[in-house]
Image (cartoon, rainbow, N blue to C red):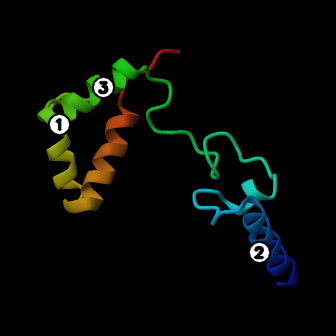
Amino acid sequence: MRKANALIDTAKNAMDAIGGSGAGLGIGALMGIPMKKGGTTGKKKPSSGLTEKQKSSVAKKASAGKDIGKKGKSFADVAAKAGGGEKGKKIAAAAMWKNIKRKG
């Protein structure tokens, strides 16, 4: 617990030294600790491996209600079967990005 408090105090001192609130900066960034590639979690985006053109095409198809990777499976159908609402949309989006054909 003492180490954590010491780190927080160090971060506060660093924020004061740079003359701001440190908004948008994590404690690690203020202390010079390098972040993992892709943010703090190191997870890849579900759309990784696709070009911007492919990503755009997929998003347009989903919003138009067309199939999202498998025949007969539209975004709205998958979202409704997954429980609807915000949860259904998240599950449908994950399925959509998973079923996209990638190069390699």
- Of badges 2 and 3, nearer the viewer stands 2
Depicted 86 relative to depicted 43: above or below: below
Q: CA distance from mark 1 to mark 2?
A: 44 Å
Circle 1 is placed at which residue position? 63
Q: Residue drawn 20% across and 41% down?
A: 75
Under mark 2, the amino acid is Ile
Q: Quadrant of the N terminus?
A: bottom right
Circle 2 is placed at which residue position? 8
Q: How many marks?
A: 3
Q: CA distance from mark 2 to mark 3?
A: 42 Å
Under mark 3, the amino acid is Ser
Q: Secondary structure at mark 1?
A: helix
Residue 50 in view in this figure: yes
Q: Earlier in the sequence, mark 3 or mark 1?
A: 3
Q: Is residue 51 left or right of residue 5?
A: left
Q: Secondary structure at mark 2?
A: helix
Crowd rating for badge 1 (residues with CA inside 10 Å; few <14, some 14–19, many 20+):
few
In the picture, residue 12 is in which quadrant? Answer: bottom right
In the picture, residue 27 is in which quadrant? Answer: bottom right
- Which of 25/35 is in front? 25
Crowd rating for badge 2 (residues with CA inside 10 Å; few <14, some 14–19, many 20+):
few
Q: Secondary structure at mark 3?
A: helix
Q: Residue drawn 34% across and 41% down?
A: 95
In the current view of this chain or complex, which residue is farthest to the top?
A: 104
Q: Residue drawn 44% across and 33% down?
A: 47
Crowd rating for badge 3 (residues with CA inside 10 Å; few <14, some 14–19, many 20+):
few
Under mark 1, the amino acid is Ser
Q: Is residue 61 left or right of residue 26?
A: left
